Image (spheres, grey):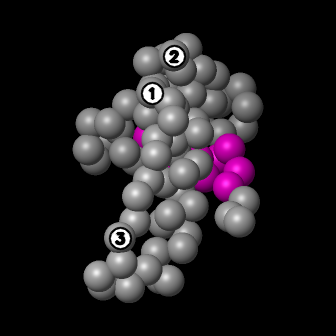
Amino acid sequence: VVIVNDRAAFSRCWTMRRTYDLYLGGSSGAVLEAIQQKAHHIKLHDIVIVLCPDAGEIYADTLYLPIWLRNRGLTEVII
């Protein structure tokens, strides 16, 4: 089990958006952040399957809105 807080999950969403133009929701960001945290355990020929359960469109007014993040003390997520 990997515990991922909102700050890390949302930051991963913004990183994926900027880097790969993927528009993911918070749950997907949490999944990808958890995988990143465990990456050192993954061996060269291991197969990793990741399910991203939500898309970012429904979060346009929250997770992807800088003022929403700022109001919650999460401004560094978008840096």
Compared across the picture, whether 51 is left or right of 2 comes to left
Q: Position of residue 4 (x, y in %)?
A: 68, 55
Q: Secondary structure at mark 1?
A: loop
Q: Earlier in the sequence, mark 3 or mark 1?
A: 3
Comparing 34 with 15, the one in front is 34
Q: Is residue 63 visible?
A: yes
Q: Earlier in the sequence, mark 3 or mark 2?
A: 3
Q: Which residues are magenta?
A: 4-14
Q: Nearer the viewer, mark 3 or mark 1?
A: 3
Q: Disc 1 versus disc 2: distance between alpha carbons?
A: 7 Å
Q: Position of residue 66 (x, y in %)?
A: 54, 26
Q: Is residue 66 visible?
A: no
For the residue marked with disc 3, what is the amino acid? Ile
Compared across the picture, whether 9 is left or right of 13 comes to right
Q: Residues within 10 Å of mark 3 (few under 14, many from 20)?
A: few
Residue name at image x 26 percent, y 44 percent: 20
**In which quadrant of the rendered image does the N terminus lie?**
bottom right
Q: Residues within 10 Å of mark 1 (few under 14, many from 20)?
A: some
Residue name at image x 44 percent, y 34 percent: 24
**Does the magenta stretch mainly form a helix, a strand or a loop?**
helix
Residue name at image x 52 percent, y 45 percent: 29
* Residue of label 2: 58
* Residue of label 3: 47
Q: Secondary structure at mark 3?
A: loop
* Residue of label 1: 55
Q: Position of residue 23 (x, y in %)?
A: 38, 31
Q: Disc 3 versus disc 2: distance between alpha carbons?
A: 30 Å
